[in-house]
Image: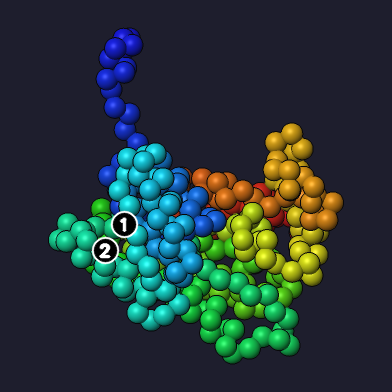
Amino acid sequence: MVSAQEGEGRKVSRALEGKLALITGASRGIGAAISQNLASKGANLILNYTSESSAQKTKDLSKSLEGEHGVQCLIIQADMGSPEGPVSIITKAKEQYGDAFKLDILINNAGVSRNLSIANCTIEDFNWQYQINVLGPLLLMQACLPYLPHDRSGRIVNISSVSSSEGFPLQSVYGGTKAALEAMTRTWARELSERATVNAVNPGPVKTDMWGGTSEEFQGYLRPFIQKTPGSKIRKDIDDKDLVDDEERAGGRPAYVGEIAGVVGMLCTPDALWTTGQVVCANGGMRMAI
């Protein structure tokens, strides 16, 4: 039996204590929630953001995480859609950490979406989405290779979407980018089997700026899917008021960012060693809805 005095003096070990995690697109939405989750588990963080408009958000997030969880955060601005951006993240991290630099966790979260009909898809739009959602993670993965663990303790999680498999209207390009990311996930799981697990997580609609910016037309297409999603039923005594008020139009609720971050965080722990090459559903059951 442990005395109260002994219990007070004992430091509780966190699952990711001392690990270093890189999160792209960390300034807001799912990326910020993942950063919060990993920091709560003891991981030190490299927080990547793209545009100058996200600079202050990332600084505020870093300060909050360091104060709340006692972790260290390194902020790096880089454009995941440029050929130089992904490489520059690792170059700057190496400059900060020196020869001791080792990357334990990589979260490929940064992504963009533009919903267009077949007739309105353009080469410019295709290139923009594929450069950020597919080429960016590949270039970052290449840059990270020399710094990943060699004992299977590494964790790589790619943020995909149910759009990769559900065939939503207006998502010829976006759905394709996420399917490509899932294909790379399986390949990387085999190539990196002695170094890291590699998995993807596929959210459905999530309460973020991206969801709020979708058109009435697209949300109308999603309504039948949301209505048949087990986890999307509105709970008036628990859910946010704006989601409760929007129930009739939307057909239910999107996920909260923390619900996605929780699955990602789980995949980053030692408990997830025997899970690799998988697309792990974090969509309330939408993947099986229709």
Name the outermost residue toward the right: 248
Residue lying at 52% horizontally and 68% vertically, measured from the top left: 111
Image-based side of 161 in relation to 95, left or right: right
- Residue for point 73% across, 48% down: 242
Quadrant hosting residue 125: bottom right
For label 1, count other residues whose C-alpha is less than 10 Å away and answer few (under 14), some (14-19) or many (20+). Answer: some
Which residue is depicted at the point 38% across and 81% down? 83
Give the SS element for disc 2.
helix
Q: Are marks 2 and 1 in contact (CB under 8 Å)?
A: yes
Rendered residue at 66%/78% (across/down): 172
Number of on-image labels: 2
Residue holding disc 1: 74
| Residue 12 position within the rendered picture, expressed as x and y whole percent measured from the top left | 32, 29
Location of residue 105 in the rendering, given as x and y in whole percent from the top left corner: 35, 55
Above or below residue 8? Residue 270 is below
Distance of label 2 from label 1 (alpha carbons): 8 Å
Res. 12 visible in picture? yes
- The vertical placement of 259 against 236, above or below, is below
What residue type is disc 1 on? Leu
Q: Pinpoint residue 51: horizontal percent, then vertical percent.
A: 46, 70
Q: Which of the two residues, 288 or 83, is positioned nearer the viewer here? A: 83
Q: Quadrant of residue 167?
A: bottom right
Which residue is labeled 2 in the image? 93
N-terminal of the pair, mark 2 or mark 1, is 1
Where is residue 239, by image quadrant? top right
Which amino acid, by three-letter code, is at mark 2?
Ala
- Location of the C terminus by quadrant is bottom right
